[in-house]
Image (cartoon, rainbow, N blue to C red):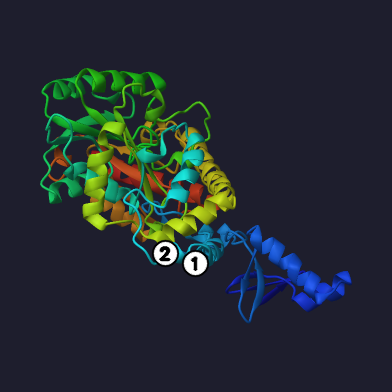
Amino acid sequence: MVQQGSHQWDDKGIRLPAVRRVAEQYQCSVSTAIRAYEWLEQRHLVYAVPQSGYYAVQNGLGIQDMDWQEPLDFASAAPDPRVFPYADFRHCVELAMKQKQDELFLYGTQQGLPSLIELLQKQFADYQIFARAEQFFITSGVQQALAALALMPFPGGRTKVMVELPTYHNMPTLLKSLNVPIAGVRRTFDEGLDWDSLERQFAEGDIKFFYVIPRFHNPIGTSMKAAEKKRLLRLAQRYDVYLVEDDYLADLEDNARQDPLWAYDTHDRVIYLKSYSKILFPGLRMGVAVTPVALIASFGSMKRMLDIDTSLLSQAALEVYIHSGMFAHHRKIIRSRYAARMEVVQEQLEAYSDFEPFRIAPRTGGEHTALPLPGNIPVRTLLSRLQNRGIIADTTERYYPEGTYRAFTDQMLRLNISNVPKQRIAEGMQIIREEIMKLQIRSTT
């Protein structure tokens, strides 16, 4: 246990002074001190641990990035474990158990906890998502929503799913395991989507939906402009194709004018997906799908077949977490930390813009960018050499459907900053630059 001022740090968090000590310090009765702590607990500013005392709700801050001794992991896309809101969410789970004990021992609804959906309606307005309560579904992560959409029938009986190339790495694997036919359309840094190919495939008439990541694309990091979103919606309407918008990093957006695809949709073509795993922690497995009215019945039936209902305890805890203001506070912390790290990335890209991979790499927000590599670079050798120097990195190969990567000339490193301390990013990017340049020189001699 470490003493700091009038507080103590231990494995449970920041321990606050004992009730009797508070009473003595402020010359009040013990019952008054207890009521004061209870008042703070009701507002989720403190939480009680039996036989231990009261602790301040906090978000894992205070851990110094410079103390980081592990390898610099530019490959992992998981949230920063050093700012997981463990104590906060544990308190919310305990409070949910008390407040929702009657509901927790029953099966829920196929949509989700009604009180949480009501709260999400209000929260989603901040993302420019305005929809009726019956359009919301709480899912066991976005992955379950994607599985339900891939399996369920769509109007017109179409069967094929289109993805971007590259795309979220689990999507092609999911479609293959479900025996769902897949189509692809290329998306690049500079030109965005291959619009000619996209329209040609839409016009062929067998695409039931196009899975797209308009904001902070995974893996290349770019975001669509408003004109591109409107163009995509016009084509979807013309050829009767639905659009599945994966807005997994909506909480990291700092541009108030960067609206989701849903906000431009006037013909109910968009299914909107949002994950809470990226902003909180992966183990929460909580996602939200907002569907057009025409798909409510089909999606609800498929979801119920897959899992009956999503964990009510997780839903109740998330409700407490959002309602208390903890989520908004945590989102602000994560957004600030990631923005500061991405600023260092962009500074490095600009400082060495004479180095072609740095010059071409997208200057994005979010949590990642991608470095295009010369075609003659032996990528496996590069990854091995980086690992020997304490850098974990990965290519974008797994973001293509199996067997299609070699058809493209794009060799890229995906650089994610969510698990790299801010003070070590420049060091890591310098090592990456050095190793690429060494292999470039070797390949030309």
> The disc labelled 2 sits on which kind of residue?
Leu
Q: Is residue 341 visible?
A: yes
Residue 21 vs residue 412, the one in the foreground: 21
- Badge 1: how crowded within 10 Å, few (<14), some, or many (20+)? some
| Disc on the earlier residue, 2 or 1 | 1
Q: Which image quarter holds the N terminus?
A: bottom right
Q: Position of residue 75 (x, y in %)?
A: 36, 52
Question: Could you say which disc has been placed on residue 104 in the image?
Answer: 2
Look at the numbered disc 2 and give the secondary structure of its residue. Answer: helix
Which residue is denoted by mark 1 in the rendering?
97
Q: Is residue 364 above or below residue 198?
A: below
Horizontal side of residue 7 vs 258, given as left or right? right
Q: Which image quarter holds the C terminus?
A: top left
> The disc labelled 1 sits on which kind of residue?
Met
Q: Residue furthest right?
A: 27
Query: Rounded to the nearest whole Å, what is the CA distance between mark 2 and mark 1?
Result: 8 Å
Residue at x-position 28% and y-position 46%: 145
Q: Is residue 17 above or below residue 407?
A: below
Horizontal side of residue 92 vs 296, given as left or right? right
The answer to whether marks 2 and 1 mark residues whose Cβ atoms lie closer than 8 Å is yes
Q: Position of residue 161 (x, y in %)?
A: 17, 36
- Badge 2: how crowded within 10 Å, few (<14), some, or many (20+)? some
Q: How many marks?
A: 2
